[in-house]
Amino acid sequence: MASCTAPPDGAMKACSADHTDLMKVGEHGGITLIIRSKDYFPVLEKILKEVPLEALKAEMRWKMIRNSAVYLSSDFIDLMVKMNDDLYGVSQKSPRPRKCYYSTTSNTPWPAAKLYTDKAFHQENREAALEMLEKIRGRFMQNLEHEDWMSAEDRKAAQEKLRKMFFQVAWPTDKEGKTHWPVETFDMDGHMGPDFFVNYMTVSRFSIQRDLGRILEKPDRREWGGSSSLDVNAFYGPNNNGLWIPAGILQPPFFDATYPEARNFGSIGCVLGHEMSHGFDDNGRQFDARGELHDWWDQETVHNFAERSSCIANLFDGYAVANRHVNGKLTLGEDIADAGGLKFAYEAFITSKERRSYEKRMFFTAFAQTWCSVVRKKSAVNSVLTDTHAPAKFRVLGALSQFAPFAEAFQCPAGSPMAPIRRCQLW
Ligand SMILES: [Zn+2]
């Protein structure tokens, strides 16, 4: 069964004969495979049987060329530019520095992440973020004590879930919290050469090899999946009950150990609280402390949750871009997370020290500035239809108008748009 294609000089070999585990997949008594898209394989099989072999070969050749063109000479790249101009109206070649940055960080994210955290990342930002996370968790925990719309048992179970939530901050760590770089940080050492295309092939082959090797391994709950320390983003995993806060977001303008606390809590603090609250939004709440999907709330609590969250959904239904209304049900999870994040970060901020009124205003300003962005109208309309996040402007207005301390800090008169008489209140 050994079928092995000869790789270009320097690239490692990856042959099907090396993967005997793969042969057992799906066989009787073999390895069980979880298929997320049930409809895909019957259709694929039909295509493979019915489409002429030459057409399939041509399609595969084309895919190979399209994916590799950007790593080849200008003959290939110029053709791609022409095609992208036709398809997307993008007629510019990527400037060289941009291309170097993206090709390195997308193909070898972990070696690049290690370089970044070793050489450029402010190490003290990690400690400060961990400390902030614990403060925010503490506030959420205390709030749960008083959620009288939940049964006492469900409150306890929610606290247990929050207690068990693990944090991956800046870079990967193991169960004990010790630094634990994934294998792809180092396994390509010594395999990279001066040829850009060969390096690309080598990286692809290593990645396939690693994935196949994982078939029999137990999943690691703390694994970073498709993200790395380089991402300017943050994630909550409902199946793992874990938080991932890459080093990339623990830097200005979101955070710096030298910034005033008001600014840090208002910006990164709310992001951390947001991710934490995802564990208790309309989707995350269905998973328990271990990340398992089942009903762990009683009927009454579920009913009250639905009632309180529909207030938030209705609020966002009322927002519109160019006459297109936000779909409050679609954005509900994010809106719940925004409201929770804002509240717990703010409470952590004001309870950790005496705060002056200008500091409170700075907190809210930092929160709003996190979402400051420029969007074309067409793109905004598109995201109203497809994005699970409401447009940035409404995320700011929606969250702040429902949070009474904002109106107090800026002395908005009761009944004005940012100080409604009735507010939505979930967490
Ligand atoms: Zn989110």
Image (cartoon, helix red, strand yellow):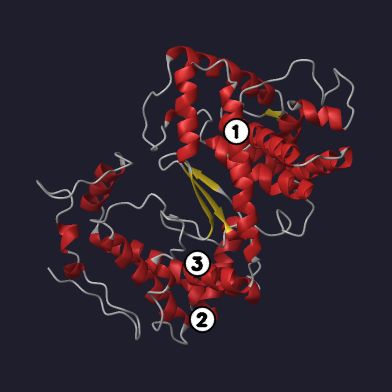
Which label sits on residue 259? Answer: none
Towards the viewer: 321 or 409: 409
Residue 18 position by quadrant: bottom left
- Residues under labels 2 and 1: Cα distance? 55 Å
* Disc 2 element: loop
Towards the viewer: 66 or 362: 362
Give residue 216's position: percent from left, percent from top.
Answer: 23, 56
Vertical position of residue 141 compared to residue 13: above or below: above
Image quarter in which the C terminus is found: top right
- The 10 Å Cα crowd at callout 2, few under 14, some 14 to 19, many 20 or more, is few
Towards the viewer: 241 or 281: 241
The residue that disc 2 covers is: 73
Amino acid, disc 3: Pro
Residue 273 appears left or right of 214: right
* Disc 1 element: helix
* Disc 3 element: helix
- Residues under labels 3 and 1: Cα distance? 34 Å
Please report the residue visible at 63 percent of the width from the left and 42 percent of the height from the top: 135
Towards the viewer: 71 or 426: 426
The residue that disc 1 covers is: 140
Amino acid, disc 1: Phe
Of label 3 and label 1, which has the lower sequence position?
A: 3
Amino acid, disc 2: Ser
Of label 3 and label 2, which has the lower sequence position?
A: 2
Give residue 52's position: percent from left, percent from top.
Answer: 24, 57
Q: Is mark 3 within 8 Å of ligand 1?
A: no
Task: Report whether residue 246 is seen.
Answer: yes
Residue 19 appears left or right of 188: left
